[in-house]
Structures are given as structure tokens and as C-alpha cells.
Amino acid sequence: MPRNSYTFSSKLPKAFVFCLFLLILFQFAVSIFDNSDNFENQELDRILHRNSKDVDYVFLGDSRIRSNINEQTLKKNDHLEFLNIGLGGATSVPLYFMLKRLLTNNPDMQIRHCILALTKWHLVDIYAARPRELYVTRVFTFSEFLEIKEYLPVNLIESYYLSKVIPSYSFPETIYFWDVYGKNDFYEYPGFEANTRWYSDITKEHIAFRDLSEINMKYTEKIIVFCINHDIQVQLLVSPLPQSLYDEFQLVNPYSFSEMDQFIDHLCEKHQIELIPMPRVLPDNDFQDYSHLNRKGSIDYTERLLDKLIRGSGLPLTLERTSFHGYVQ
């Protein structure tokens, strides 16, 4: 009988077994030291499990709605229940799934109003910034992933499958993931002086000048339709920018926001919803960076927003536009 050429005394199987052992050991170490999944679950539980407690106003948006809405100011209106689902790097796609999960997890809960905040950053490609990829690889369920798969680039599809098969694949992304779900310190910062040119990195290649993406436009409208079908009054909100940055945008590309404005007009007319008449431009010293309000700015902005939402302002639902400088205040 001929001798089997594949024997356990050969070097290849020993090397293979040793590498497999190291991989298993590394996976075990990652499961111990990488607690981002636990943090993710805790944060999602905090946001999405309300014990069926009714919500008067839910805010949906990216990091700007998270920083611009001051929690302490909301708490002064203790007769109302607010929920801020403002997540760093979020687009309409994860926000749609978050809203669906919120109602699924709380079947007896009623949401009365949904404020959907939009920005140009919010409406470009879902994979245009690193934190946005993490919603695909770390947050979306398999059914949600399949729903948006046709819109994703090949590398992100591969990343999703790798992250599920090899847990350690996502380990290097932990620091980014904390940026997405981490503690919000936006309104703790003092802000910048009006004459500080801290926006010098804004160029024609910046994310703000990219075209709106098909998937984000589609899921923005899906949020609106979902709200209407669930008897939730939905309103749109455009997050403000600093005056000097807005002026700089005009110098670089005077039509950078026109596509977004046309899309918002289309949604308001088609679904008979309101664009909340809030200023598109605020003083530079209300901001901590190029688009996030500081603590003082967030308090002032939240008070003005609540005045529009709750106490009523008497302003018309549609606002007159002037040139490219936002809406008349």
C-alpha cells in the first residue's frame, strides 16, 4: 500500500494548525478587550427601548441635531417628552431603520411629532465618510443590509460579510465607532471668534459640494411616508451654518445648496408637510466648528425652535428666499 503523501509529520499542517490556533486566540482576546459591541447595544437600548412611553417630539438627524438641540433646555418643558436620535455620521438610511425599530420595540408607544433635520452632509453618499460605513458593518441587521445592498459599493458589501464572519475584522474600527455612538461633548466647547478662518479646508472637493445620493433621497422620503402612515406629524428642519462659512460656500460654489433646497421643496409640496422656519445662518461665535453649535448657540437655537414648535410664531409655513443666503429670518 503506497504511503500517504499527506502526513501529520509534514511542516505545512503543523504551521496551519499553529496559525489557526493564533487566530482563535486573537478572536478570544478581541472578544474580551473590545467592548464596543456592548456599548453599541447599550446605546441602542437607551435610544430604542422606551418601555412604550409616549414621545411628543422625536428629533432625527446627524451629529448636528445632536449638538444643536440642548438637552437641558428641553427638560425645562417637563410636560413634554422629547427623544433626540441625532447620531454622528448618520444619514436618512440608518435613521429610517432606527425609527422603525423604535416603534417595533415599543408597540404601545405613540409618537406625536417627528422633526427630521437635513444638511447637505446628511444627503450625500451613505459611504462618503468613514463613520457612515460603520452603520452598515456594525449596526444594520441582515435584513436591513439586504434592503440597501444594491446601493452599496463592492468593498462595503465585502466588509459587511467579513465583519460578521470574522469578529476581529471590526476591531480597528472601534475608535471610529465611538465617534458615532460616543458621549456628546459638542455643547461643552466655547466656540470660535467670528474672525477666525477655521474653515480653510472647505474646497470644491468637500463632501458638502457632492451631489445628493439616490439612496439618501429615497430614504428621506421613506421616513416621511412612514411617519404619515403611522399618524406622526413630520416636519423638516435645515441645520444652520456660520455666517462666514456660508459666505465662503457662496464664493466657492454659489449653487452648492440649491439641489438640497429643490429636494426639500419637492418633499414639502408632494407630502404637504412643513419646513420649520428656522434661520439657515447664525453668527460665527455660536459655533464650535464649521457646522456644530456650541453650548451657548445650542441653548439659543433650541429655545427658538421650541418657540416655533410649541408656542407658535405666527409665521407662514413657507418662507421667502433671498439670493443664496438662506431663508428670511
Image: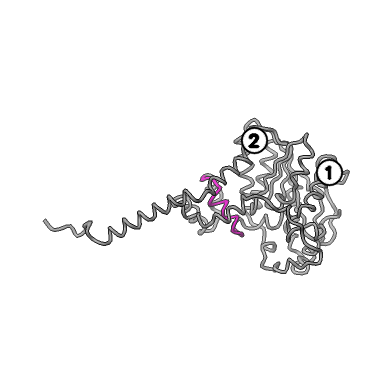
Point out the tag, 1 or 2, that comes first from the N-terminus.
Answer: 2
Residues in magenta, as a range: 127-142
Q: Please rate how many residues cluster around mark 2, counting C-alpha atoms within 10 Å: few if below 14, some from 14 to 19, many from 20.
A: some
Q: Position of residue 2 (x, y in %)?
A: 13, 58
Q: Position of residue 156 (x, y in %)?
A: 52, 57
| Whether residue 204 is situated above or below residue 100 in the rendered picture | below
Residue lying at 50% horizontally and 53% vertically, measured from the top left: 160
In-front residue for pair 17/270: 17
Q: Which residue is label 1 attached to?
A: 307
Q: Are marks 1 and 2 in contact (CB under 8 Å)?
A: no
Q: Is residue 290 left or right of residue 18?
A: right
Quadrant of the rendering where the N terminus is positioned:
bottom left
Residue lying at 73% horizontally and 63% vertically, measured from the top left: 256
Residue lying at 82% horizontally and 46% vertically, measured from the top left: 303
Report if residue 46 lies within the magenta region.
no
Q: Position of residue 18 (x, y in %)?
A: 32, 57
Which residue is the extreme one toward the right? Answer: 314
Q: Please rate how many residues cluster around mark 1, counting C-alpha atoms within 10 Å: few if below 14, some from 14 to 19, many from 20.
A: few
Q: Is residue 200 left or right of residue 165?
A: right
Amino acid type shown at disc 1: Asp
Q: Which residue is label 2 attached to?
A: 50
Disc sitting over residue 82 in the figure: none
In-front residue for pair 101/88: 88
Report if residue 139 lies within the magenta region.
yes
